[in-house]
Image (cartoon, rainbow, N blue to C red):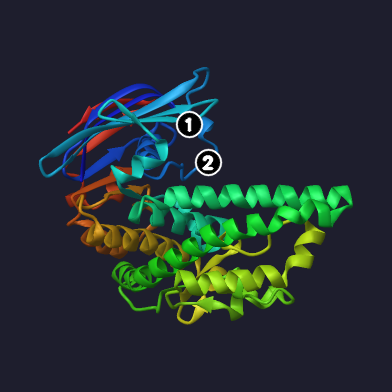
Amino acid sequence: MLVTHVELKDFRNYESLALELGAGPTLIVGSNGQGKTNLVEALGFLSTLGSHRVSTDHAMVRQHTDAAIVRVRLEHNDRKFLAEVQINRSGANRAQINRSAIRTRELPRYFSSVLFAPEDLVLVRGEPSGRRRFIDDLLILRSPRFSGVISDYERVVKQRNMLLKTARASGNRDAQLSTLDVWDERLIEFGSEIISARSSLVADLSPEVSRAYERIVGADHGASLANSLSIVSRQDDPENAVATNAVGEIISVADATTAFAAALDSVRKTERDRAITLVGPHRDDLIFGLNGLPARGYASHGESWSFALALKLASAELLRRESSAGDPVLILDDVFAELDQSRRERLAESIANFEQVLITAAVFDDVPEHLAAHVIHIRAGEVVGSE
């Protein structure tokens, strides 16, 4: 898949931008704060419906304007189409394909990209929420229908928590919780499907991560992934739950359903006291391992950076292998500045055969020369040169 044309209107510091892109690597160069990352953030949002930098969409709308527009022309084989998303400061976002309105959550069906940025270091060192979002974004790119499943699950969790809080506040818990079983059924239905799909994805992704890490660092450090599931963890010993319940095998929907129901039953009293849903995909984690140890807490800065990069390269490899729409667009935002010369060259070799690669850099010489066949210069939200 190729992005052949990009238009931005009132996105971040771009009042208006029109840019042609081609196949192969494109280097986007500019000093810090000029808009390089804003440009690739817009493309990333189009394929994942989220920003790698902020949690709220309105932060991407240019100051003193009501909406931002990201519009791209896409091409794969003989197919060409126009994809567009309007990000509204208030109200729901809107999306179009070939000028016809679609549901926004359907956009990942049409455009696939994998973006790596310095912020992705938190995948290894940060909290579980970032790792859950990473695996769910990849799950949606792999199977776009899960956008709806995940949205439905999040809605059920929210409604269930509201019911638990209302019951605790009223003092008449039994009466207030009479409908809890109904919400439990929906929670288990959507949650079990997510748990099973995540387990299958992690099983496929783990060997790709191992190979990608080895290509980057030039050595086999035993990089691995595993799920940590709240539905099988010991609620009476939460400190050891992650360490003792890493699950690497694929879990069927039926098995997840059984375990989920049992877990809800075991924590029912605690949930009523705390007024919060304690088990389910929203409480799970991914365990990243290096040399048999958890990467979080044991990996050095360089190892953590390489692991995060391996996660994204492995994601791109998995998507290109499974997609009928060709390679995902690979986006590397300010990556090469953090790598030594040998790792820069190994990374360049790893990405050389992708259909389209977009690379941002503040310093031209940070990027291997053969990745700079096409260079775009950005300054203050404008393209000031292309060569």
Q: Can residue 362 be seen at all in this image of the molecule?
A: no
Q: Nearer the viewer, residue 268 or 138?
A: 268
Query: Which residue in the structure is indicated by mark 1?
Result: 60
Say above or below: 293 vs 117. Answer: below
**Among numbered discs 1 and 2, the one appearing first in the sequence:** 2
- Considering the numbered disc 1 on the image, is that residue within a helix, a strand or a loop? helix
Q: Can you name the residue that lies furthest to the left here?
A: 78
Quadrant assignment for the C terminus: top left
Q: Amino acid at mark 1?
A: Met
Query: Which residue in the structure is indicated by mark 2?
Result: 54
Q: x and y percent of residue 94 in the render?
A: 42, 29
* Relative to 264, 77 lies left or right: left
Using the image, tell me which numbered label, if any, was put on residue 95.
none
Q: Amino acid at mark 2?
A: Val
Q: x and y percent of residue 86 in the render?
A: 41, 27
Say above or below: 250 vs 339. Answer: below
Say above or below: 19 vs 320. Answer: above
Do the residues bearing badges 1 and 2 touch, measured as CB atoms within 8 Å?
yes
Q: Nearer the viewer, residue 58 or 188?
A: 188
- Considering the numbered disc 2 on the image, is that residue within a helix, a strand or a loop? loop
* Relative to 158, 110 lies left or right: left
The number of discs equals: 2
Residue drawn where x is 63% and y is 52% of the image: 157
Residue drawn where x is 39% and y is 56% of the image: 138
